[in-house]
Image (spheres, coloured by chain):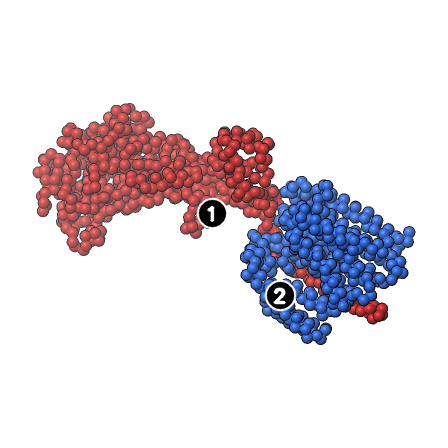
Amino acid sequence: MTVFRELNWGLVLIWGALAAFGLTAIYSATQGPVSEFLPEHIQQNFLRQATWVSLAIVIIAAIQFITPRRFQEVSYLFYGFATLLMIYTVFFGVEISGSQSWIQLGPINIQVAELMKIATILAAANYLTSRRDITAENLKTALAALLFFIVPVILLVLQNEAGVAVIFLALLPFMLFWSGLPHGITLLMISPALIGYFAILNLTWAIIAALLITFVIFILQKRVWLTVSSLALGLVTIIGVEVALHQVLQPHQTARIEAFANPAVDPQGSGWNVMQAKTAIGSGGLTGKGFMKGTQTQLRFLPEQWTDFIFCVVGEEFGFVGAGSLLTLFLLLFMVLLNMAGNQKHPFSQLVIVGAASVFFIHFTINLASAMGIMPIIGLPLPFLSYGGSAFLTNSILLGICLNLDLYKRTLSIYR
Amino acid sequence: MSSVQNRDKKTSLRILQAVILLTWLVMLGRLIQLQIIDYDTYAPLSMQNFIRQEVVNPARGLIYDRNGTIMVENEPIYSITINPASFDMSKVPLLAELTHSDEESVMERITRAQQYSWFRTSRLFTEVSFEVFSNIQENIWQLPGIGHQIESKRHYSHDLLAPHTFGYLREATREDHERFEHLRLGDRIGKSGLEMVYENYLRGQPGTEYVRVNAYGQTIGHFEESSLDVSPVRGYDLITTLDADLQKLAEILMEGKKGGLVAMDPNNGEILSIVSSPQYDISRLAGRLDADYWRSINIDQDTPLFNRAISSRQPPGSTFKPFMGLIGMHLDLITEDTEIYSSGAYIRGRAYGDTADPGNYDLRKAISHSSNYFFFWMMDRIATNGHLNTWSRLMKDFGMGVRNSIDLPFETAGIMPDSTYMNNTFGTRRWGIGDLMSLGIGQGMVSVSPLQMAVATSSIANGGYRVQPHLVRRMVHPELDTRYSNPESTRIDWIREDHLRVVQHGMREVVTEGSGRWYADLGDIPVAGKTGTSQNPHGNNHGWFIAYAPFDDPQIAIAVLIENAGFGSVSAAPVASLLIEQYLRDSIERQHVFDYVLNFSPREEVPDEIEEQESLDGILPDETGGVQ
């Protein structure tokens, strides 16, 4: 009975609301009038997702009966197991839409990379909190922790899943930052992403961003070598992006990257997805076109509308009222998790919860920014909404672990 | 350590919260921008995505003859279409069987359709027979993805061709799009004949349909229950003045000959039949463009696309003489009784030959026996007295040398020389009497079309009225008001009744006693006419015949020109007389003349019995040069 009272029911409610949003949108995107134009296996997506949601309830509940120390104990083993699966996938994986990242288990396909997320968070958290002297404040330790992230990134690139690899690269600064990595170095780590983004948009902005970041790093750390390397990294990033866009990449690849900034350049090709996604969201207006009445969704103008572009379905059919509510739910999710992390005594619990919150946040940002046309499209699912069993279960397990750590926070602190 | 770390964690927490909140606010801001601020941009964009405006073509107006017989109508073209995405490949054998083709070629067509678009409908078989079309319709339930398209093309019924009169349709050019509104890319419009002149009435107004489409371009259904749709308005039907039976006979008679003919009601200018030969098969230009055929008629040396009935310019030869007579009397050069002695050659600087017997000629005899001397004499007086311009103006009153505004394109004005024309041709004052003499017998610079001769002949037949030739009597429409053509006949005021009677009798005697008596005399139907042979420096002479009948109550006036056929009396006259017979008797009783015309071939040698009578008008040394 204590379990019930102590459980963070607010988080469970948020999870339930997000899953309900997802099921509604998937239903509309696959069972609505649009189903006429969809192959049969996609029409079954709603029922399958409903199954995953039911299964997730059971799994989240089951996780609550695990002793939190277990997560620490099995973290390396689990990481090793997941890595082996990843390696196996590189050679024997099933290829689905261009990426060899799936393992076939009977009738279902499992995306191992999703498991790898849990494993990486647990293992990195365990390593960074295993001894007192091990924190990211010590740069050598930070470099050692880097290995936990580099391995999946390399394996994912080999699986032709660069998009998912971005998650691991983005997760790294969050976890190291929490573990005490100096602010200036954290900033240095994320600076290539920021400067690179601006470099695609506008060269001047990119240079200003590079100089600004260098200045902030100087203020934060007051170390000459760091300041110089920040400036150098900034310039290398800018030059690298320019060379890649104009020398290395084929024109159609460059167009695909730049399409988000100006979709009208190639409305039939790379700009099509961006244009249709923005049109779906924009034409939803304040109150939306109504459930199963979105013309973009139901007449198939949206690409991947049950997975990567599911936010557009919400935006079109439920308007700003619906999409804004969804955004608010996500903000609540992040804030509740961060708050939860702050309440943890044990650093392992803190780091795992921060890691989980970061993974959700990174997915959320990339997915919405892609759908709303503020960055080049990277095909990543929206947590708890997009169709997909592996992703939904992984995210739910992560949330379940957070709930578990929070539930037993006093128990765990004893062992500290 | 612990306290320091805790404070540090709090800062970290605040920083993380700030980063997430900031990013979240960017997302919210973008959402507000898209859904609230730019809603007016994106809402129409999404409408444009799924609403397609489709044009519904109106039915083109039909063309009828004067008795209500349909001559030009619309015929559906059936095409079988395929939507490759919904097609079931196991149905290929069935499809092959229904379309009477083999599986291989069906597969080939399906592959091509798939290459074009997997989701869009494309044509699988174009212009299939009605039998294949109904085969498919009966089995449509077991052929998913198969559909049909019905378009329309012109169909020419009643075995008529009349290509120059009806005209063909072609895809509109860029200039056409500027000229006509409502024209869409790929629309076909009239490019010659009535189809061209009455394009604006025949075409009708296209309608509009709004349909919902999906991203693959498939039509899902009507938009707003068709409440915004506009129905097409069909085109006007043309009720023409043509007599389909007469037209058909005329086409048969002109088969294998080069030339043109125009038959009209002399009382009001209604064209009963109009033929230019050689013709071309207009039905082969009706459907999809038959490029080989189109090229072949364009490069044909006999220029089948040229409308000889209204566009060809030839000297009228002796058919000119009745009009010369009327002008001569009007100018007081002669009276009804003036007799002129023909010595066999008119001498004026040189000898102008005449094959008619020497002797005394009054106007009536000069027409019926086609005296050249008489009209050389008259032209000499006209030229010498400085009446050339008056003469030219009076001739133009008959409709020669001017356009008659018939409702067909590419009508020629012909040439009726006056001093300005002569100055322009030869240089100011560098021409003289020698260039004018031959005009008197319809040779030299003067040139006319069969249409002009028919109009001029009508004036003699109807008592001196200039008629307005026309092909369309009225345009009718099931919803709109009927439109009538209002051609007006005007009296040529200088023509006197008694003068006219002399000429009319002269022309009657051509048929009873003169060169028209072999082929143009219809016995109980009194015919008046005049034969002519126009000199052609480039080859065999052209034969002319103008006529009207019945003599005392004219119902039909006709002008026939047959190129390179020698004497008009043996080439053009039988054609004209058969048409008069058909029109007034409704049957052909002179089978031997009919057979003669069908098997007619121009003869180099003049038959003996004709040679005496038919003067080879104006056998001149080639000084005129302008005969074309």
Amino acid under label 1?
Leu
Which one is nearer the viewer's eye here, B500 or B18? Answer: B18
Query: What residue is at 66 percent from the left and 55 percent from the top?
Result: A157
Chain label for disc 2 = A
> Considering the numbered disc 2 on the image, is that residue within a helix, a strand or a loop?
helix
Q: Taking A59 as reference, is B249 left or right?
A: left
Instruction: Judge left or right: residue B170 versus residue B106.
Output: left
Q: Quadrant of residue A364?
A: bottom right
Q: Alpha carbon of mark 2 to alpha carbon of mark 1: how far?
A: 51 Å
Whether A103 is drawn above or below A73: the answer is: above
Assign a secondary structure to mark 1. loop
Residue A51 pos. (x, y %): 76, 44
Mark 2, other Cα within 10 Å: few <14 / some 14–19 / many ≥20: many
Asked whether, in this view, residue B221 is left or right of residue B76, the answer is right
Q: Which mark is residue B185?
A: 1
Residue B390's disc number: none
- The verdict on a common chain for dots 2 and 1 is no
The residue located at (85%, 56%) in the rendering is A69
Q: Identify the chain of the residue marked 1, using the numbered disc in the image.
A: B
Output the letter for the chain in blue: A
Identify which residue, B232 or B467, lies in the foreground.
B232
Which chain comes out red in the rendered image? B
Which label number is shown at residue A237?
Answer: 2
